Amino acid sequence: MGFIERLEKKIKVKEKQIEKHEQNIEKLKDKLDSGKITRAQYNIKKKNYETKIKQCDARKRVLQGLEAKEKRHQEELAEKKQKKKEEKLKKKGKK
C-alpha cells in the first residue's frame, strides 16, 4: 500500500467521523424535542460535537493537501525519468 492510498484511507476515516458526529447532534436534537435533556445540556453537547467536527474537517483538509502534493511529486518524478530515457536514446542515436 503506497503513501497516497494510506492518505486516501485516512481521509475516508475522517469523513466517517464527521458523519458520526453529525448523527450524534441529530440524536441530541431528538432527545431535546422529547424532553429527555434540557436546552443547556443540548447546547453544551452540541458545541462539543461541533468542535470535533471542525477538528476532523481541518485534519481532512490537511490530508487532502498532502495527497495533492504527493501526486504532484510523483508526476514530477515520472517526468524526470521520461526525460532521462529520452536523453539516453538521443545519446545512443548519436553514437
Image (cartoon, rainbow, N blue to C red):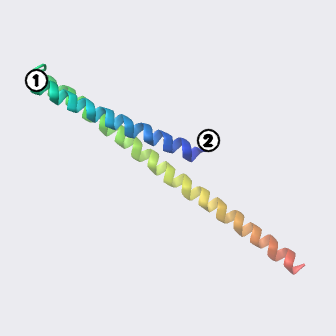
- The x and y percentages for residue 83 are 71, 69
Where on the picture, by quarter, is residue 74? bottom right
With respect to residue 5, does 28 lie above or below? above
Secondary structure type for disc 2: loop
Quadrant where the image shows the C terminus: bottom right
Which marked residue is nearer to the observer: mark 2 or mark 1? 1
Q: Nearer the viewer, residue 32 or 60?
A: 32
- The x and y percentages for residue 75 are 60, 60
Q: Residue at x 26, y 29 (%)?
A: 24
Amino acid under label 2?
Met
Is 61 left or right of 66, judged from the image as shown?
left
Residue 1 circle label: 2
Say which label, 2 or 1, has the lower sequence index. Answer: 2
Amino acid under label 1?
Ser
Q: Residues within 10 Å of mark 2 (few under 14, many from 20)?
A: few
Is 69 left or right of 32, judged from the image as shown?
right
